[in-house]
Image (cartoon, grey):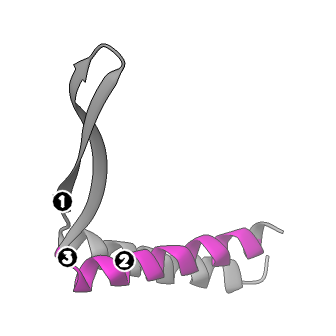
Amino acid sequence: MRNTVLVLVGLIAIVVGTMMVFSRELTFRTREDVVKVGPLIVTADRDKSVALSPIIGGVAVVGGVLLIALGARKA
């Protein structure tokens, strides 16, 4: 059971790390209230982005490979 969890977490780390290496930023949209006057509420969609470091993505890929190696090893 423990080995299966390590392999699964390793695969997830490899996928996320690979996405971080090839994508420079993560962009998402939030909805914010702009004006509140009595029962009237005006909202606006705002785009926000977070910079991703390819170095951290590379570390995640290497960590995922190590987790898979540990999970594949017989106890």
3 and 2 marks in contact (CB < 8 Å)? no
Q: Is residue 20 left or right of residue 25?
A: right
The stretch in magenta equals 3-24
How many marks the image carries: the answer is: 3
Q: What is the x, y in percent for residue 20?
A: 29, 76
Sequence order check, earlier mark of 2 and 1? 2
Q: Is residue 8 left or right of residue 65?
A: right
Q: What is the x, y in percent for residue 71?
A: 68, 78
For discs 1 and 3, the disc positioned in front in the rendered view: 1
Q: Is residue 17 above or below residue 5?
A: below
Q: Is residue 39 left or right of residue 12?
A: left
Q: Is residue 27 above or below residue 69?
A: above
User: What is the secondary structure assignment of the residue under circle 3?
Assistant: helix
Residue at (45% x, 81% y) in the render = 14
Say which residue label 1 marks.
Answer: 49
Distance of label 3 from label 2 (alpha carbons): 8 Å
**Mark 3 crowd level (few <14, some 14–19, many ≥20, 10 Å Cα):** some
Which residue type carries mark 2?
Answer: Gly
Say which residue label 3 marks.
Answer: 54
Q: Nearer the viewer, residue 39 or 50?
A: 39
Q: Is residue 15 left or right of residue 4?
A: left
Quarter of the C terminus within the rendering = bottom right
Q: Nearer the viewer, residue 69 or 45?
A: 45
Which residue type carries mark 3?
Answer: Pro
Say which residue label 2 marks.
Answer: 17
Quarter of the N terminus within the rendering = bottom right
The quadrant in which residue 37 appears is top left
